[in-house]
Amino acid sequence: MPASRMAWRASRVAYADVAHIRDALDVPEPVAWTLVRRGHTDPAEAEAFLAADGPLRPPEETAGAAEAAARLERALARNERIAVHGDYDCDGVVSTVLLARALRARGAAVRTFLPSRFEEGYGVAAGTVERLADEGCDLLVCVDCGTTAVSELTLATDLGMDVIVCDHHLAGGRRPPGILVNPALGPPRDDLPAAAGVVFAVVRALAARGGDGRLVPPDEDGIDLVALATVADAVPLVGENRRLVARGLAAIRGEPRPGLAALAAAAGSDPRAMTARGLGFTLGPAINAAGRLAHADEALGLLLADDREVAMPIARRLWGLNEERREVERRIVAEAVAIVEAEPPDRRAAAALVVAGDGWHEGVVGIVASRLVDRFERPAIVLTRDGERAKGSGRSLPGVDLHALVGDASEDLTRWGGHAGAVGLELPAERVGAFRDRLVEAAAGIRSAIERARVREVDAVVGVRDLTLPNAEAVERLAPFGRGNPQPAFAVPAAQLDGWDLVGKGEHVRMRLRAGGAHTRAIAFRWGRRAAELEVGERYDAVVSLGVDRWQDTVGPRVELTRLEALRDARADGDSRVKIASGPSLRALIATGLPDAPPAPLPTARPATINDRRGLGSGLPTLAALAGADRGVVGLVADVGRRARALDTVLRPDRLGAEGVVVPRGGDSRALGEAARRGAVVALIDLSALPGVAIPEGVHVALIDPPADEEGAAWLRARVAGHHMHLLFGPDEIAFARDVVESSL
């Protein structure tokens, strides 16, 4: 598993903000780093974020919601027949349930319609419009679809139906007739909702217009379903979306509706402990399985069920479909990976992937595309060929706009749509090669953006000793997690792989990581095919998430590994990344104690702050963490000659976004100041060199080894005045410093 690039990076922040959040909120330092890196530097604002309990937007702020509520109220007053046309995925099913329940609660005659992925396909079909008109529908409401169905909805108006479109997909140049409810048409916002969130705004606006002055149904009825759809559709979990999910999860944990309780039971999970992860990886996929492998009406019936006895058989069928979907997915993923790995080198190295197979199940190609993105770290589109037609889905890396990318290569597409992170498309089978060439060419134009997206942004740099249950419980306060508010990513630098084994029928890898005298177990999901590349005893940069693992009556930390990059090839070119200041050669350098005492007593100035982590085995990760704060960090050591290798081959300042400098006894410290002026520095300074070193402003001081005597401590106090100081030594470092002194006698 060679290290061909940086595995991670951390944005530079002010340590004073981290310390302020840590102390004001009484949270562990990894959580404080996370909050600050995510923009929460004010304690009051950070506390509000953690609470996730702010008010919801007035529904009328959603563009078109007030007009839609007024038209629906008129339909209710006139006893019009209303058709609700949804989509076959979780968001479309939930949106249909929300609106149908709200209208039926007011006595409306509602006809629901969900298309078949295999017959009508995505969106609104002309044949469906004609059928609904023939049934006597007066009002057609499209939820999670309809934005691009201009000709079909024009046909609806020609046949005498009024139209409302409640959607969140991007609108093209032409818009369909009727009332459009779409927050994308309003002021820009970071928390554009799922379609269920759009429908929820309409339902709330309609409830507020109840003729008898009561809210019918209650103002937040259905918020549990909105939470499910919001997570399943992977919209950003920020702002109002995050509040919706937090409230929806509370509703599920308190009193789950029969359909969700039955589905959780079929999956073997407890709704009382439901999390956003459970929505996204358990309930959501089971709802989606109906539309992927059969018909979404099964899922619709489950969520509309008012009785557990009615819901349970449906839930079991859906869970069975989900298990079938998993098996189909595993087979197609294996075939797709094999196709990519068999490609010529230039195509395998392209900035985007297009993979096509004959007869692949079109219900799982989107999931397969996600697996290819995870494996090959580039946008991926997976197509299934069926006769003369090819149809499929694409997924992308965070920050890489796949919608725009496909738009630049859309010449051969007969249908397509979606958003920045996911697209669906259709084209003649004979044009797949031409489309691949155009997409690869378009992706080559943004290769630098794709390369940047491959490097994982981490929220904090930690040691193995930080991966504890109390810290995991503190991390949970940042939930619910999802797109826009992902599970915090923690970098564990230079962890040693002690061993690994396959679990879950060989699909997953469980491994043991060690660093700083501590060890932890980590699970890497879907890494079974990569296990042969792992080398026990090697050091790796690991990127992990930290959560709470609850199983029956046991609770413990869950460490999930998401990235692993070997350090053994860090200097394949043989060149050091560290500047050695002028002075005695490191090979010949032997510490000989501190210089003579100064002619006058030194002032007993104090550091700006003292972070006492003595005895926690945190030297390496703390240095790496502080490389991302202010203007970097210097580590003070008893013998720089014996410590410098760690800076060059383990810490590797280049992947910390800093410049490495070593200052031995008698060395010139000007390189240290120049590096700090250029950006940031990670330096090792021999304690014996400290009297001649000026530590640049804004650079942290980490005491890795203790000074030999009080005289050395006095020099140290003088040099670190005004700096943030971090005490990192423990028994091993004290023994090392003692050995250095004894070897110089």
Image (cartoon, rainbow, N blue to C red):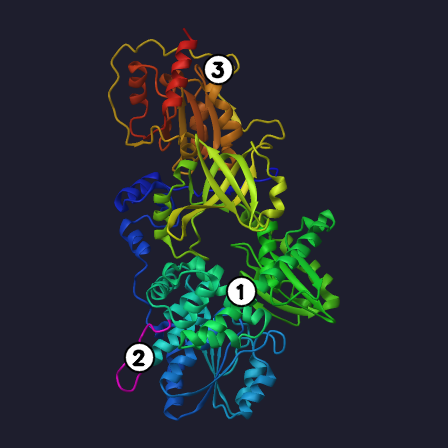
> What distance separates the C-alpha of mark 1 from that of mark 3?
58 Å
> What distance separates the C-alpha of mark 2 from that of mark 1?
32 Å
**Secondary structure beneath disc 3?**
loop
x and y percentages locating residue 2 in the rendered image: 61, 37
Residue drawn at 50 percent across, 69 percent down? 316
Are the two marked residues, 3 and 2, in contact with CB atoms closer than 8 angstroms? Answer: no
Residue 573 is covered by the magenta coloring: no
Are the two marked residues, 2 and 1, in contact with CB atoms closer than 8 angstroms? Answer: no
Q: Tag 3 or tag 1, which sits nearer the N-term?
A: 1
Extent of the magenta region? 209-222
Image-quadrant location for residue 726: top left
Q: Tag 2 or tag 3, which sits nearer the N-term?
A: 2
Magenta span main SS: loop
Q: Which mark is residue 583?
A: 3
Image-quadrant location for residue 3: top right
Q: Nearer the viewer, residue 89 or 592?
A: 89
Circle 1 sits on which residue? 419
